[in-house]
Each structure stands twice: as C-alpha cells, then as structure tokens.
Amino acid sequence: MNYKNRIGRYIKSSAVAGETYKAYMPTPLPPEPELDMASLYTLLDKASAALGRLDGMSMVLPDPSLFLYMYVRKEAVLSSQIEGTQSSLSDLLLYENADAAGVPLDDVTEVSCYVSAMNYGLERLKEFPLSLRLIREIHAKLMDNARGGNKQPGEFRRSQNWIGGNKPSNARFVPPPPEKLMECLGQFETFLHDEKVQLPILIKAALAHVQFETIHPFLDGNGRLGRLLITFILCDNGVLKEPLLYLSLYFKANRDAYYGHLQAVREKGEWEEWIKFFLTGVVDTANQATETAQAIIQLFNADRNQIEISGRSTAAVLTIHTYLQKYPVSNTTSIRERTNLSQPTVMRSLSTLESLGIVKEITGKARNKIFVYNEYLDILNKETVQNSVSAKLYV
C-alpha cells in the first residue's frame, strides 16, 4: 500500500536566533488510504473484551468511588513521572491530607493539578462536548501551578515549540508553526465530531492521540493532556462508564517504542503499526486494572474479616478501616476530624489495626502520627515508586 498521502509535509518557517527551520504539518484525519482494518480486528476484539471486563468491575466493586479515587491518583503520578516529576503516590496522598512536610512540593502540586484537570474534564463532558474550548479549559486546570503559570495556561501557543535539542533547527521534532496551528486544530476538532467517520472508538482514540501529540498545541503539558484525551474520548463515547483506563504506565514502560511509533506515523504513514501497539496497551492495561480491582476487593474483605474475628472488633475500628480505604495515608488529626471520633478512640482503634498488621505508623513520633494502610498502598503503588526519599519512607 502506498502511504505517501498519509505523510505530512515540512514547511520552512521564520528565522529563530538567525536560523530558519522546518516545521511539520500533519495531514488531516482519518488517514488516506483507509486503514487496513483486517489487520486490526483480532487485537481490536481482544481490547474491546478487556475493556468490557474492566467496565464490568465498576458494577461489582462495593464502592466504585473508592477505586476511582485512588486509581485516578495513580494515573496522575505515572503521567507526571513521564514528564520528569519525582513524586510518589504517597507524596500526593500526604499533600492532599495537608501532611506534605518533606515532599517535593513543586512536583506534588503538579501531580495534584493533573487530578484536578482530569476530574474537571470528566465533569464538563457530562454537559459539554469534547472540543477545542474544553481542551483549553482542561489545560488551564492542568497548568495551575508554579511551574505552569508562565506557560500560557488555557491558551494555545503563539510561539514555536519543539521536542529535543535546544532550538528548532536541531530539534528531534518541530510541530506546526504558530501561524498554522489553528488550521491543524480546526481539522482535529472536525475529526472528533465527524459522524461520517465510521471507525471503532478505540481506533478513533488512537488516531486522535497521535494527532494531538503531533500538533503539540500548548507550550507545555501536551503529553499529559494527550494521555488524558484517550480516556475522555472513551468516556464521552460510552465505551467506559467510569474513567478506569489509563495508558501512562504502558507508555512509560515502552517509552522508546512509543516515541518510535509516533515518528513512524509522521515520516512513513504507519498508522496500522501504531494502532496495534496502542491496542496491545489497552489489553495489558485493562487486564492489569481489573486484577488490581480484584486484589483490592480481596484485601478489604480479608482485613475486615480479620478485624471481626479478632475479638477486638468495634464500630470505631471498622469506621477507621473504611476511612483508610479512601485515605490510606493519613494522620490522627485528619482521621479524628473526618470520622467524628474522639482522639482517645482514634488512638485505641489505630493501635488495634496496627497490632493486626493492617496499618503501620511511619513517623515514630509521639505526636502528629501518620498511619499507612500498607498492603493497600503496595497494590496501588506498583510501578509508580521512584527513588525519592519519600517513596522509600512511605511504601
């Protein structure tokens, strides 16, 4: 098959620091010639089945909101780590509980903004279509931190950006120049809503992700927003009832292959190979998320059963166990305020949970103690822990 018509063109752009450079203009979606769907159906079926199993988990979880709460945060950590932050999931949970002393504050606020952007986008999608306007709104939430404040949050770039190198002329990749940006974005938005494009939603999401990354419409935050876009498209089109699929771990574990496929699409028009890579990630990620949800259900049930047969089961102990399912890293003050239990009752109940091996106190202090629901955090923390001091301390 001749892929020439799929390949974008390079255009000569205005001088930067005395040099001219070539920027890439992608061809509009969908690809021409059309995708070879016969080569994709086997993987597409596997990915759809894996997504169906994952979506079904949202109906059997005793409290889906708990899993979503933590899973969204795990994704925020992973996606931000791809961009170079050092925060662990424990750092984020401590920050959200106002226990952030000692954690890398700039990093953790960046991760927290990712959570805000994700939640904001999912809520807005209930009443507003996925559009350039909404993408800008989500970007504003994503960049609402010290690092992002000078990167035009919520605004499409008005200057040239590039990937790799220290200037456009020696960069690994140069996205469209600012004067061509709205042309590319207009075509992108048309593709998102074009009802004449009869493609499975998973494949549409795969195409949209690459196109967004290629256009790179913001000065910063494009990678994180591009990964969020996948989940937004799946939820907006009803493929997922809940936002349970995030591919950041897969992209992180296969970083070289990921970037290689993006560039192969741009230079050779190899959309099918990218889609196969993407669908493989959907299968792996959906299966892993399903296994994580099952492991969490088993842990909660086993620990509750252990409490009940221990002879030390009280309403307060069970209340705190339930509380820690949402806040697995928490201090005694937060527990007391959010459970409306007295300080002595909180301390006695935590002592019981600690003696049963369910929680662990990590500060060694007499006051302002911090307790961790260890095994729960271990399940969530797989592949998110980096070599930060806080990660070593809390996990």
Image (spheres, rainbow, N blue to C red):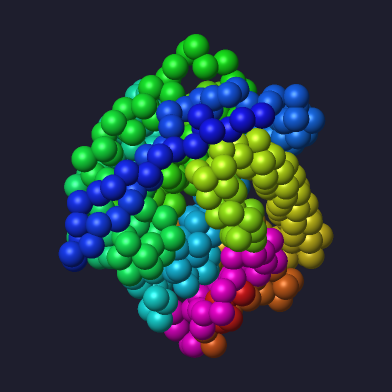
Q: Is residue 176 above or below residue 390?
A: above
How many marks the image carries: the answer is: 0
Q: Which residues are magenta?
A: 365-390
Viewer-proximal residue among 36 and 109: 36
Q: Which residue is painted at 21% across and 40% down in the image?
A: 179
Q: Is residue 253 above or below residue 197?
A: below
Q: Is residue 55 left or right of residue 14?
A: right
Quadrant location of the C terminus? bottom right
Q: Position of residue 363 (x, y in %)?
A: 52, 84
Q: Which residue is painted at 54% across and 87% down in the image?
A: 364
Q: Which residue is painted at 75% across and 30% down in the image?
A: 39
Q: Is residue 382 magenta?
A: yes
Quadrant location of the N terminus? top right
Viewer-proximal residue among 221 and 176: 176
Q: Position of residue 136 (x, y in %)?
A: 29, 39
Q: Position of residue 360 (x, y in %)?
A: 63, 76
Residue 339 shows in the view: no
Write down the quadrant of residue 381 in the picture.
bottom right
Write down the quadrant of residue 358 in the picture.
bottom right
Viewer-proximal residue among 302 and 72: 72
Viewer-proximal residue among 29 and 131: 29
Q: Position of residue 14 (x, y in %)?
A: 20, 51
Q: Which residue is painted at 72% across and 35% down in the image?
A: 47
Q: Is residue 295 left or right of residue 182?
A: right
Q: Is residue 275 magenta?
A: no
Residue 372 shows in the view: yes
Q: Is residue 218 left or right of residue 89?
A: left
Write down the quadrant of residue 250 in the picture.
bottom right
